[in-house]
Amino acid sequence: MSASAPNGPVNCLVDRLPQRERDSVLAHCEPVDLELGAILCDAGEPFRHVYFPLTGFISLVVVVDGHPPLEMGLIGDEGMLGATLALGVGASAQRGVVQGTGTALRMPAAQFRRDLSNHPRLARTLNRYVYVLVAQLSQNAACNRFHPVEARLARWLLMTHDRAHADEFRLTHQFLADMLGVRRGAVTIASGALQERRLTRYSHGRINIVSRKGLEAAACECYASGRDDYARLLT
């Protein structure tokens, strides 16, 4: 089995493995659809499967009683859901929710543990990815506390753009408010400011990235920090 059709989408973690390890991992995976809103794992529950997104993306969210879920991390074709199995931790610390429809490669968690034992390069790659993911989670916590909504929104749109591989995607202001942990009105104001600067367009729940370069300039430094961590350790 291959990760995708020829010249089709790939998962970067799987694709960078040596041929023998890559073929072995792919042989134990099955392609699945990522359906918007699907919960793939929940906090405190054991992983049943791990997911390597090809298209689409998954949010790692924290749920607190009486409040909307707060996003702490985002996983697309650069990463995987279930990476903490590489540390011997079988349960998820966050809820994993599909926020962008697409496809993924899915493997049973028990088989993934066996592959980690049999393939040293896979284990080494996952150890580095776990570091990148932990750095993203801690950066998000600081970003949510210290940076203005407009800069945080620009960062989130860039992260989504990286994983959606499209200039247009569906995101409502209410959804963005929930993910950023702010009121909807704050997102409306921040989104309006980005549109006035001709960096984005918003219409009927769809956001179009007009100027990626301008959006990068509008984002806080957290976006570049996360991108640089990944490039330094995994490319």
Image: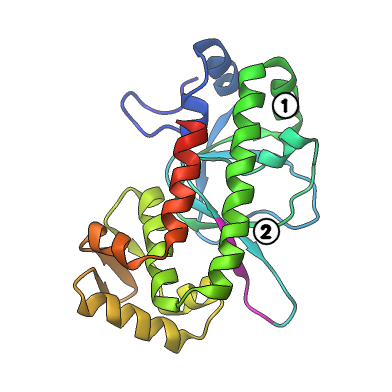
Q: Give the left or right position of residue 41, taking residue 159 as reference.
A: right
Q: Give the left or right position of residue 71, taking residue 55 as reference.
A: right
Residue at image position (41%, 74%) is: 172
Numbered badge on residue 218: none
The color scheme shown is rainbow
Type of amino acid under label 2: Arg
**How many tags in the picture?**
2
Q: Give the left or right position of residue 99, taking residue 90 as reference.
A: left
Of the two numbered discs 1 and 2 on the same chain, state the one appearing first in sequence.
2
Asked whether residue 27 appears in the rendered view, the answer is yes
Q: Is residue 70 magenta?
A: yes
Q: Secondary structure at mark 1?
A: helix
Q: Position of residue 77 (x, y in %)?
A: 46, 41
Residue at image position (44%, 70%) is: 152
Magenta-colored span? 67-73
**Residue that carries the numbered disc 2 in the rendered image:** 95
Q: Secondary structure at mark 2?
A: strand
**Residue that carries the numbered disc 1 in the rendered image:** 111
Type of amino acid under label 1: Gln
Q: Is residue 41 above or below residue 47?
A: below
Q: Position of residue 170 (x, y in %)?
A: 36, 65
Classify residue 153 by image quadrant.
bottom left
Q: Is residue 195 magenta?
A: no
How far separated are the C-alphas under marks 1 and 2? 22 Å
Q: Position of residue 171 (x, y in %)?
A: 40, 69
Classify residue 203 by image quadrant.
bottom left
